[in-house]
Amino acid sequence: MDKKVKNLVVGCGLSGTVIANKIATELKEPVLIIDSKEHIAGTCYDYKDSSGITVHKYGPHIFRTNSKEVWDYLSQYTDWYPFMHNVLGIVDGIEIPIPFNLISLHKVFPKPLADKIEIKLLQEFGYNKKVPILELKKTNDEDLHYLAEYIYEKVFLGYTLKQWGLSPEELDPSVTGSVPVYISKDCRYFQEKYQGIPRNGYTKMFERLLENPLIEIKLKTRYEDIKDTISYERLFYTGAIEEFFNYKHGKLPYRSLDIKIEKFACEKFQNAPVVNYPENYDFTRIAEYKYFLSEHSNVSIVSFEYPEGFEEGKNERIYPILNQETQKIYNLYQQEAQALQNTYFLGRLGAYRYYDMNRTILGAFETFAKIKG
């Protein structure tokens, strides 16, 4: 072996960075963290454009959590810009709040019909309740069933087909339940207690998390290229679990994104940070970045998101496609992983889960607790 390390972390995204930070700061042990990308921060990576606008290279990231532990942990490494996310969707040419809520209801339906349906929703489910669209479709009430079919067709089906390449029924409920019907006038996309964006950007927050003399970083370095020339006491792997095992049980499917970032000579391109297009165009949504940190410029930078299937060598794995069949394949890899000593699989790709940033950090905390003893 050419090199020996105490802790090897594969992937400098959120999972890898948090576990490296915890090992270095709490266990006082050295860590080597590698990543195939040319930058740290994984898909959270952002940068300041020449116009002064902070751009999220891989699409918009808004951090939110109900965990004070997670919030306080990250707050050691960043100041926050308080941000409550609002998303609009274009339905029948009308801008409505997403998720579909009582305000959306009154925007798309005539008042007598909207009033009637609102009363029935409140009677059936109560106020401030979130109802998965597939559950709402099962209702026996004629008006509520009509509403469910309308939302399913106009808001949910087209977006899901574009995003996943599958119908809602072909996906795990954990995915389809993430965009419910919200019986409320709360137009926030998220309701967590703590919500915000790092005031100086995600990349700066990652830099501070990794700012420890015990942490060594090697970018543009693939695990496959060095695994035969390095030994370690512990391995923390945040890449695709099936790739680690050389696809012995088959490939796990993912969706990817083709993100096209463009600059427009206008102060404001749209009326919300993110606007969804469930019915029109081939892209799913447009994000406008100056909204996120209230940055001012006479131009605006937006990104168009075109979902596509993952193809090795062409794009990146971003969203695991969760259903019963893929779970069976993942379970075989998980059994292989459990048989290994001092090897841990983390994050969206390592755990093959549709994790948000909060759940990703909690996963790293859970892994650290195992090794801390």
Image (spheres, rainbow, N blue to C red):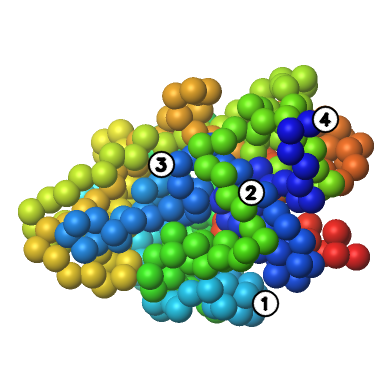
- Out of 245 and 279, give the one closest to the viewer: 245
Q: Which residue does the image show at 72% across and 22% down from the upper left?
A: 246
Return the x and y of residue 127 as percentages of the image width and height: 53, 76
Instruction: Say which label, 4 or 1, has the lower sequence index.
Output: 1
Would you say 304 lies left or right of 120 here? Answer: left
Mark 4 lies on residue: 332
Instruction: Identify whether 10 is placed above or below 295.
Output: above
**Which labelled disc corresponds to residue 59?**
none
Q: Which residue does the image show at 74% across and 38% down from the upper left?
A: 3
Instruction: Say which label, 1 or 2, has the lower sequence index.
Output: 2
Q: Which residue does the image show at 57% across and 78% down from the upper left?
A: 76
State yes or no: discs 4 and 1 in contact (Cβ < 8 Å): no
The residue mark sitting in front, 4 or 1, is 1
Q: Residues within 10 Å of mark 2 (few under 14, many from 20)?
A: many
Q: Residues within 10 Å of mark 1 (few under 14, many from 20)?
A: few
Return the x and y of residue 171 as percentages of the image width and height: 60, 38
Specify the amino acid type for callout 4.
Answer: Leu
Q: Secondary structure at mark 3?
A: helix
Mark 2 lies on residue: 33
Mark 1 lies on residue: 69
Would you say 336 lies left or right of 77 here? Answer: right
Q: Which residue does the image show at 56% across and 65% down from the upper left?
A: 211
The residue mark sitting in front, 3 or 4, is 4
Return the x and y of residue 1 as percentages of the image width and height: 78, 31
Specify the amino acid type for callout 2.
Answer: Ile
